[in-house]
Amino acid sequence: MSQQDPPRLRLGSKAPNFQAETTVGNIDFHDFIGNGWVVLFSHPEDFTPVCTTELGAFSKLEPEFTKRNVKLIGLSANTISSHGKWIEDINEVNQTKLTFPIIGDKDRKISFMYDMLDRQDLSNVDEKGIAFTIRSVYIIDPNKTIRLILSYPASTGRNSKEVLRVIDSLQVGDKYGVTTPIDWQNGDDVIVAPKTTTEQAKQKFGEIQIVKPYLRFTSVPSKA
Ligand code: BEZ
């Protein structure tokens, strides 16, 4: 097993480019991102229970991502042919039609580059001695900048609606220069950013609710 550390990807890092085999053909990742947003997410293994529910949920929610100019792309270290057979199960179990690409990262090169491998020690490996991919999520914007990174344990399925909620927050934030509070949902009031004076905020947004000088709410049109 390699002792080399993967590159340090952080919020604000440029998403590294790669070429990959996927269930819908070969891709260059930067070309795939194009001028839109991308959710790149990994799962540990095809034909496993939690992953089957997750991929089904993302597939069902895909129209909402598409409305927001977001493409989904999955990844695991299984082969394209394994993904293809598993998609039939995902569709049957979740009553969906999964169409987004899933990368076959057999040699784990992309998983390594994106820090999607579990801890690298001798006890945490598959039958070939290689670490499993974890449940990672990367949200990447049209500038190819990483805007969100999540890592979940294998035992816990993610929340597809939470990923969509973060997309809404980031897109509203980018458009209006605002931030969003705890448990915010699309359409709720947003927070005026500290760098905006109340006078500027009134001119830009109209009504402002001042709870504290540093905590000011306003409304912006809801998305999608
Ligand atoms: C699952 O999807 O259920 C799973 C996959 C790998 C390890 C543990 C659980």
Image (spheres, helix red, strand yellow):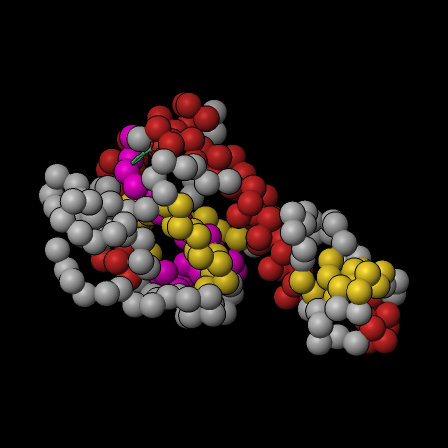
Residue 29 percent coordinates (x, y): 36, 60
Q: Which residue is drawn at 52% across and 35% down?
A: 60
The image shows residue 176, relative to residue 43, as above or below, that is below
Q: Residue at x 37, y 66 (%)?
A: 9
Residue 111 percent coordinates (x, y): 28, 54
Is 218 included in the stretch rendered in magenta? no
The image shows residue 13, relative to residue 153, as above or below, that is below
The image shows residue 53, relative to residue 136, as above or below, that is above
Viewer can see residue 23: no
Give the total number of marks visible in the rendering: 0
Residue 4 percent coordinates (x, y): 18, 65
Residue 137 percent coordinates (x, y): 42, 51
Q: Which residue is drawn at 53% across and 48% down?
A: 163
Along the line of sight, which residue is nearer the eye, 209 or 18? 209
* Magenta residue span: 28-47
The image shows residue 191, relative to residue 121, as above or below, that is below
Q: Quadrant of ligand 1?
A: top left
Along the line of sight, which residue is nearer the eye, 89 or 47? 47
Q: Residue at x 62, y 53 (%)?
A: 168
| Residue with the most extreme right position | 207
Is 43 included in the stretch rendered in magenta? yes
Left of 70 or right of it: where is 21?
A: left
| Residue with the most extreme front position | 212
Looking at the rendering, in which quadrant would you find the N terminus? bottom left
Viewer can see residue 141: yes
Left of 50 or right of it: where is 142?
A: right
Left of 220 or right of it: where is 89?
A: left
